[in-house]
Image (cartoon, helix red, strand yellow):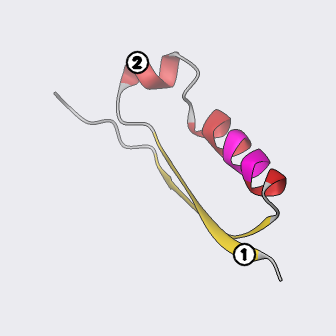
Amino acid sequence: MKKNAAIYCRVSTEDQARESYSLVKQLEMLKDLCKFRDYAVYGIYEDAGISVN
């Protein structure tokens, strides 16, 4: 029986978005990790909000 996993991606600064920590890149990496560990992805949550410092 596969374990379930939820994926949560977040970019909190403009620097992260520019330096290849985009939501798309994070999602790709996390999906690959779930596949490697044989987890079933039951939910994907994204937070594109940019925090103000």
- Graded by Cα atoms within 10 Å as few (under 14), some (14 to 19) or many (20 or more), the crowding at tag 2 reads few
Q: Is residue 34 visible?
A: yes
Pinpoint residue 33: horizontal percent, then vertical percent. 73, 48
**Crowd class of label 1 (few under 14; some 14 to 19; many from 20; radius 10 Å):** few
Residue depicted at 16% across the width and 27% down the height: 53
**How many angstroms separate mark 2 from mark 1 (CA)?**
34 Å
The answer to whether residue 43 is visible is no
Please tell me whether residue 52 belongs to the stretch shown in magenta. no
| SS at mark 2 in the image | helix
Is 31 within the magenta?
yes
Q: Earlier in the sequence, mark 2 or mark 1?
A: 1
For badge 1, the amino acid type reads Lys
Left or right side of 35 for 50: left
- Could you tell me which residue is drawn at 44 percent across and 24 percent down? 16
Relative image position of residue 44 (x, y in whole percent): 61, 62
Q: Which residues are magenta?
A: 29-33
Three-letter code for the amino acid on which mark 2 is drawn: Asp
Q: Which residue is mark 1?
A: 3
Q: Residue at x 50, y 17 (%)?
A: 18
The answer to whether residue 45 is left or right of residue 34 is left
37 is higher (above) or lower (below) than 17: below
Quadrant (top left/top right/bottom left/bottom right) for the N terminus: bottom right
- In terms of secondary structure, where does tag 1 sit? strand
Give the residue drawn at x 70%, y 40%: 29
Q: Position of residue 25 (x, y in %)?
A: 66, 34
Q: Is residue 17 left or right of residue 32?
A: left
Q: Which circle, 2 or 1, is nearer the viewer?
A: 1
Magenta: main secondary structure: helix
Residue 21 figure quarter: top right
Q: Which mark is residue 15?
A: 2
- Residue 43: which quarter of the image? bottom right
